[in-house]
Amino acid sequence: MGSVILTGFMGTGKSSVGRLLARLTGWEFLDVDAQVVKSAGRSINDLFAQEGETFFRALETAELLNLVGRSDRLIIATGGGAVLDPGNRILFKKLGLVVNLTASPDLIRFRLRHSDDRPLLNDGAAREKIGLMLRDREPCYADADIRIDTAGKKIEDVAAEIMAFLKTRGSMWND
């Protein structure tokens, strides 16, 4: 058995698709960012502001490592930058099927337009910064087993694509 690990930039639908996949499969849903917030007792904005991105990424990796012993039948939504650590990408592969959700910079900006909990985009130059961050992260995102462009799709459509892919992977995913 294995798990499904959802990667992708913020605003690509990892948490929404993950919750739906969990309902469809009966598997447990875990949002790594939510786990970090719970464990640290502080918001992501607060962690970034007071401790910095490096500290946050270390907490993120610690949460991922906690999943290794319980890696069956989980739907895991990672933080958008979790792929930057090569060790995390190796860990994703050990945990199960890695699914990368994608979207264009304009669509991501539109989806995040009302969000105030994205510390890496709080500087006002969101469109340009999203494009640069996507370009820098692309080789890491490309390491996924499957990539799905979420543009113009409902979360149900994206979940159905993932479920169809899982069924082609054999009986270990159909139990």
Image (cartoon, rainbow, N blue to C red):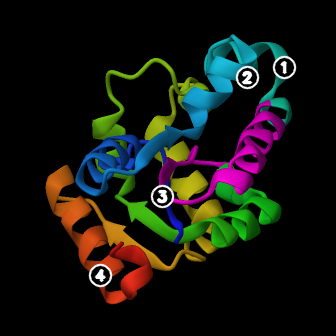
- Mark pair 2, 1: CA separation: 6 Å
Q: Amino acid at mark 3?
A: Arg
Task: Tell me which label, 2 or 3, sits earlier in the chain.
Answer: 2
- Mark pair 4, 1: CA separation: 42 Å
Is label 3 in contact with label 1 (beta carbons under 8 Å)? no
Q: Is 97 placed left or right of 170 in the picture?
A: right
In the picture of the structure, the residue carrying the numbered disc 2 is 48
Badge 2 marks a residue whose secondary structure is helix
The segment highlighted magenta reads 56-81
* Residue 72 within the magenta-colored segment of the rendering: yes
Badge 1 marks a residue whose secondary structure is helix
In the picture of the structure, the residue carrying the numbered disc 4 is 167
Query: Which numbered disc covers residue 51?
Result: 1
Q: Position of residue 116 (x, y in %)?
A: 45, 17
Is label 2 in contact with label 1 (beta carbons under 8 Å)? yes
Task: Tell me which label, 3 or 1, sits earlier in the chain.
Answer: 1
Q: Amino acid at mark 1?
A: Glu
At a point 53% along the width and 68% down the height, the residue shown is: 2
Is label 4 in contact with label 2 (beta carbons under 8 Å)? no
Which image quadrant for residue 32? top right
Question: Looking at the picture, does residue 168 appear above or below residue 144?
Answer: below
In the picture of the structure, the residue carrying the numbered disc 3 is 73
Is label 4 in contact with label 3 (beta carbons under 8 Å)? no
Taking depth in this image into account, of 105 and 29 the one nearest to the observer is 29
- Mark pair 3, 1: CA separation: 33 Å
